């Protein structure tokens, strides 16, 4: 698995300028949200959704480059197990996300450190981790993993203006739908929904990615040693 981590780190070094620009843009967007609107709910809902979408471009770019350079094919041919491939990518992709969440936490808590803001911040972190894992886990199936959260955004655009209707619709189970609902009062039911849907969806994403890779490995007749 060390070789998988090294290959992903190599990709990130090759794209360091673009990835840095994306990271800074995401931080600037969420910082602007808190500066322009002191309401934490509004900041996490609208600018927060935009910042989440921007930072999701980091794993999307790394995974896309991995497929364009056929690195994924070499990982399969080398005989790495599916969980090694998925875990290796996850360990490389999560640190930039954690850095973004740390910056977001500092910005939000400087603006407002009330318990309600802390609760929204924790839920926002869960949603960002869920979206990132969605991209990584589904990448063996979708090749370019950004399609997964992008699908959520496209559905949200259809019914995202009425928060009451959104909360009652199936879109409230999607990552960006729940992020938009952070503008509302945080209830115990909403917290449970965010946590349960994150755990269930990530488990499903992982199984899809695992069995997709397992099928590819089983079809490879000559694995490199």
Image: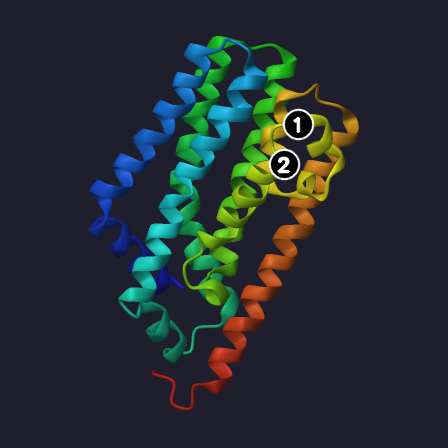
Label 2 environment density (alpha carbons within 10 Å; few <14, some 14–19, many ≥20): some
Q: What residue appears at the point 64 percent right and 13 percent down from the top-left corner?
A: 115
Mark 1 surroundings: few (<14), some (14-19) or many (≥20) residues within 10 A: few
Task: State which quarter of the image contains the C terminus.
Answer: bottom left
Q: Which residue is mark 1?
A: 162
- Determine the residue positioned at 54% across, 65% down: 209
In-front residue for pair 148/161: 161
Residue 214 appears in the rendering: yes
> In the depicted view, which residue is nearer to us: 104 or 90?
104
Furthest residue in direction front, as rendered: 158
Gap in angstroms between the C-alphas marked 1 and 2: 7 Å
x, y percent for residue 149: 51, 47
Residue that carries the numbered disc 2 in the rendered image: 159
Q: How is the image coloured?
A: rainbow
Q: Residue at x 64, y 28 (%)?
A: 181
Mark 1 touches mark 2? (CB < 8 Å): yes
């Amino acid at each position: 698995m060390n070789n998988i981590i090294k290959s992903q780190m190599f990709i990130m070094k090759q794209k360091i300028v673009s990835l840095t620009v994306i990271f800074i843009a995401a931080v600037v967007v969420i910082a602007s949200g808190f500066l322009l609107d002191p309401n934490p709910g509004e900041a996490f809902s609208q600018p927060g959704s935009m910042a989440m979408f921007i930072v999701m471009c980091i794993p999307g770019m790394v995974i896309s480059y991995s497929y364009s350079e056929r690195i994924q094919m070499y990982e399969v041919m080398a005989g790495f197990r599916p969980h090694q491939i998925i875990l290796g990518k996850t360990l490389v992709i999560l640190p930039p996300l954690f850095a973004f969440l740390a910056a977001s936490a500092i910005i939000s808590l400087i603006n407002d450190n009330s318990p309600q803001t802390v609760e929204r911040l924790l839920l926002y972190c869960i949603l960002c981790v869920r979206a990132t894992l969605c991209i990584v886990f589904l990448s063996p199936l979708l090749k370019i993993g950004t399609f997964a959260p992008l699908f959520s955004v496209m559905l949200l655009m259809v019914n995202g203006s009425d928060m009451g209707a959104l909360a009652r619709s199936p879109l409230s189970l999607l990552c960006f739908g729940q992020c938009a609902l952070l503008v509302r009062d945080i209830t115990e039911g909403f917290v449970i929904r965010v946590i349960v849907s994150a755990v269930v969806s990530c488990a499903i994403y992982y199984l899809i990615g695992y069995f997709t890779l397992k099928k590819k490995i089983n079809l490879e007749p000559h694995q490199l040693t």
